[in-house]
Each structure stands twice: as C-alpha cells, then as structure tokens.
Image (cartoon, coloured by chain):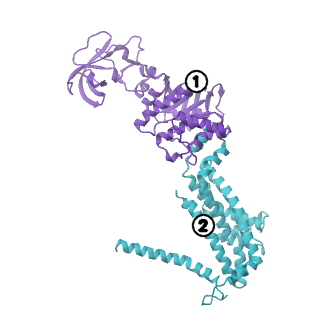
Chain colours: A purple, B cyan
Amino acid sequence: MARVSVEGIVKRYGTVAALDEVSLDFEDGGLFALLGPSGSGKTTLLRAIAGFVFPDQGRIRIGDQPVERVPVEKRDIGMMFQNYALFPNMSVADNVGFGLRVRKVGAAEERRRVGEALELVQLEGFGGRKPHELSGGQRQRVALARAIVTNPRVLLLDEPLSALDKALRVDMQFELRRIQREIGITTILVTHDQEEALTLSDRIGILRDGRLVQAGPPREVYNAPADLFAATFLGEANILPGGGTGIVVPEGVAPGAVLAVRPEAIAMTRTEPEGAGLSKCVGVLERRVFAGAMATCLVRREDGGEVKVVSRDQDIPEGLAEGDRLWLSWPVDKTLAIPPEG
Amino acid sequence: MSGAMLARLGKVWLGLILVFLYAPILVMAAMSFNASPYYQLPFEFTVEWYEKLSENRGILRAAARSVGIAMVTTVIATVLGTAASLALFRYEFRGKAVLRVLLFPPIAIPWLITGTAMLVFFFGIGLGRGTPAVIVGHVALALPYVIVVVTARLATFDPTLEEAARVLGAGGWTVTRRVTLPWIAPGIIAGALFAFAISFDQFVVSYFLSEPGDSTLPVVIYTAIRKGFTPEINAVSTLIIVVSMAVMLVAARFSNFGGER
C-alpha cells in the first residue's frame, strides 16, 4: 500500500489542456473519488497515474518513488476498466492469475492466491468458467479480483460500476467498499456519478476543464463548496440572488459571496415559522412532484426567483396544493456562502 | 414471378456457375485416370500416368522445390505481415494512411508487370535470378494478403485488453504473445494459408525469376506442355488442385473472409 501524490501535473493535447496544474494527495489506504463531467480531465489524471499518459509537466509519486517516467508494467498498480477488459481466451482463474504468472510466483502459489482472491469477491468455484459465461456483475468481480491479486500499491478504478444496472450497482458499491476496507488498499476511483462518489469515498476531488476545483471529505465539499460549479455539480443548490428580505446573511461571509441553500435543508410551513437563527421567505407552490419517499416542490418566491425543495412527503403541510401560499425557512448555518469566482 | 420460382432459378444459376467452374477440372481429373493418352473414350481406368509421374524426376524435384519455396515464403510473409498489421494497429505515425493505401495496388497490378519489374530490379541490385529471388518475389506478392487478413481480424480486438495486461505487469512481448496473438490467431493462420497458396500457385513471377532448369512446379509443367502434352501433366495438375483447394478451404474456414465467426 502506498500514498499517491501528483504535483502540478500538466497534459496538453494540441492547444487544449486536459490537465492544467493539478496537485492532489491520495492518502494511504483511503478511497478517493475523482468526480467531474466528461472532458474534465478526471480520466486523463487516472491514466497519468496508471502510466498510459505521460504528463508534459509535474510529478507523480507512488509511495516515495517518482514514477513519471516509469512504464505502466513497472508501476505495480491494479486497475479495473470500464468494460472490465477480461481476456476472452482465458478462464476466470487464468485471468485472475495473469499478473501472478507474469511475476513468476509458481503454480502452487498462483493457485492459492487466485483462490483467495476469488473467495474475497465471492466467486469461489467459478475459476473454470470463461468470461463470456458470466453475468455483468460476475465479470466485474473477476476484474476486481484480477486487479488486487498481485497486492498492488494502488488500485485504480475507471467508472467501475457504470455498466451495471441500478440495483446491482448499489450492491456492488457496498461490496467494493467492503473489499477495499478489508485489504486497506489506496484506491482512486473515477466517476461522473456524484451519488457513487459520495457513498463510496473518504475524499473526493472535483475537476472541471482540467483543473481541480475542490478536494476534501464528501461532507465538507457538500457543505462548503469552493465555487458555484462545485455547489451545483455535487448535489443541487438554490442560488439566492441578492439575498432578499428575511434571508439572514451568515457572519463572516466574504463580500461578493453568492448565497445558496440545498433543496433538502428547506422546511415548508403554512404560517410564519417561529424561532431564532432562521432564514425565511414567502412563496407560492408551483409544482409538487411525488417520487416515493421524497417529494420535490418548486416554489416561486414573492421576491422573485424559483426555489426547489426536496422534502419527505410527511413533512409537507397537510393538503398543500399547487397555487397555495407558503413560508420557506432554513437554519442560517445551512446557508451556503460560495466564494466569488476567481 | 413467385418467390418459389425465383428461388429455384437461383439454384439453377448457382448450379450452372459451379459446372462452369468445376467441369474442366473434373474432366482433367478424370482423364488423368484414363488409359488413352489422347482423351479417347470409352473411359478405361488406369493409374499408369501416376506411376509414370512418380518416376519423372524433373517434375518431382520441381514439386519439392515448389513446396519448399512456398513454406519459406509462408513463414517470412506471415511473420512480416503480422508484425506490420500490429504496427498499423497500435501506433500512430506520419504517413500511416498512405502506407495503408499503398498496400492495395500490388494486389491489382498484373503479375506480368510485377514480374518484369522485379526481374529488372533484382538484376539492378545484383540479386539476379534464382531461388532467393523467387522467394523474395513471392514474399512481396503474399505480404499484402497477409496484412489485409490479419488487419481485418485485429479490427475486432479490444485494445483495452493490452492495457489491462500491461497494468498487470506484462511487458510488450508478453502482452503480444499472451493476449493479442491468441485473439488474432485465426487471422494469422488464414493469412499463412493464403501466402502458401499464392506462392505454390505462382507462375508468372516464378517464370521470370527462376533459373532455367531449376524452377518451380508450375513453370516446369508449362515447359513440359510446350514440348508435348502427356497425361502425366493431367495427373500432376490434379494433385496440385487437390492440395490448393484443401489449403484454400481451410483458409476460408479460418478467415471467414474477414468476418466474425
């Protein structure tokens, strides 16, 4: 296991900078998610750490070793690909054992470690199958077993769950987390799925246009986004333009900061809510969408602007209908103060 | 016209094509077993011409030389062609598109012209005529076919598999041998069989490049026919056809002419 760090990485394709001065530390044994829209550079960063992309500038360290000029096969990493990339001509056991055979560990040792890895991903007894005989979820487990069987220093995951359907994906998220904790391997995950990033990782890094926007524990990034992009990319945010009457500006907010509030932080009441430390405003319910346990409401503020509220169905006042007038309120400390751009 | 009639017409048409293709061959094969040297009927079965053939040292030597040249050509053309296909598949380099396109004209240029050009060129560089020149010429003819067939197979290969193997610690040669080659093996085998058939059946280029009295089977047969036809020629031609058809059928089976099996 090892700590990974990148320092001032730059990668240009023609005039476009796929990575523009990105610096990040990936802690030993942690699970770090790189999050961003397509074209944000998250995959390029992962491939630079893997060694498929050689940066134009900057340093990459795995452990204490600078690896910018070390070829992929000498970096001692494990990687899972989006399409799993299982070798179609080999059995499951031969796929998982490939890295061990390359390292010439011997047949007995290979058999033992392949067995252990398959057990870890709950695929005992599947060693003799061919990849095309497996389901999507099973293939993914084989790919994971193959990536970790060599005890690599780092595990890299490139959109590992995107090919699975929703129910399986949630199962695999827990599974991945369990295995990662069990073996304590430094893991870097690339995803465009914010929910996946939030549920899986210890820390996340948000990228945009080749630059790192913000990095930190998911809760921290969620509660204190560094800019407007981070606020809207990770979760949703109601921007409160120019404040307005009743909206309390938290103390210590930098001048020019944009105020925002998360949809699930807002309470809806028919009458003016009592109590100190609340921001509040009046609006008219425009639309209410039922979605199982949660309901999404769109409220037009009387001061102007639309606010989205996500609330448990039972927390919405009885009989509230579209067109009704209502109060919105949230604790002042739930107001996000987003630093001005630049 | 009804569909059933169309289908029947189609079958008749196909039958006519097969007759057109195979009737001369079948007649020749039959005559190689006929006692009369002048194609006279009634048919009288004999293996006399095959016996005579087995005593004809000139033809047998030529046949052995042809097989030898075809095998050497196959090995060289297959190795070079596969390596070229892999390079075209893996790397981006200046002039790649031009190189790809330039692979095709040799297939279309008449062998007579290729042969003349090679003869002039080989004399120019001091290689002259002889077995080495024949082999070089055959390799040049076979190479584009091997590259086309192997490249078609490579088009179905997922390059992430090579990345996956490299991450697992495999160096370039191990990746090629354990991951890439097993996948394209059917294409390589088909390419090799094409190369063998092209060399073994080659007349024009062999005729130009081989030394008189030391030539390949097709050239020796041609010379023999000019001197005077004997039914031994029918016998040896029948054998050649059997070998060539077997090779081509196996090649077609492996390549499926570029398609996925």
Residue A196 falls left or right of residue B249: left
Query: As shown in the figure, which amino acid type bears the numbered disc 1?
Result: Asp
Q: Chain of mark 1?
A: A
Q: What numbered label is drawn on residue A85?
A: none
Q: Residue at x 70, y 59 (%)?
A: B76
Residue A156, percent from left and from top: 55, 33
Query: As shown in the figure, which amino acid type bears the numbered disc 2?
Result: Met
Q: Residue at x 39, y 73 (%)?
A: B6
Secondary structure, mark 2, is helix
Residue B163 appears in view: no
| Other-residue count near label 2 (Cα within 10 Å), few / some / many at <14 / 14–19 / ≥20 | some
Of residue B257 and residue B52, the one placed in the foreground of this image is: B52
Of residue A195 and residue A228, the one placed in the foreground of this image is: A195
Q: Residue at x 58, y 60 (%)?
A: B254
Q: CA distance from mark 1 to mark 2?
A: 59 Å
Q: What numbered label is drawn on residue B248?
A: 2
Residue A209 falls left or right of residue A301: right
Q: Chain of mark 2?
A: B
Do residues under tags 1 and 2 come within 8 Å of each other at their CB atoms? no
Residue A87 falls left or right of residue A234: right
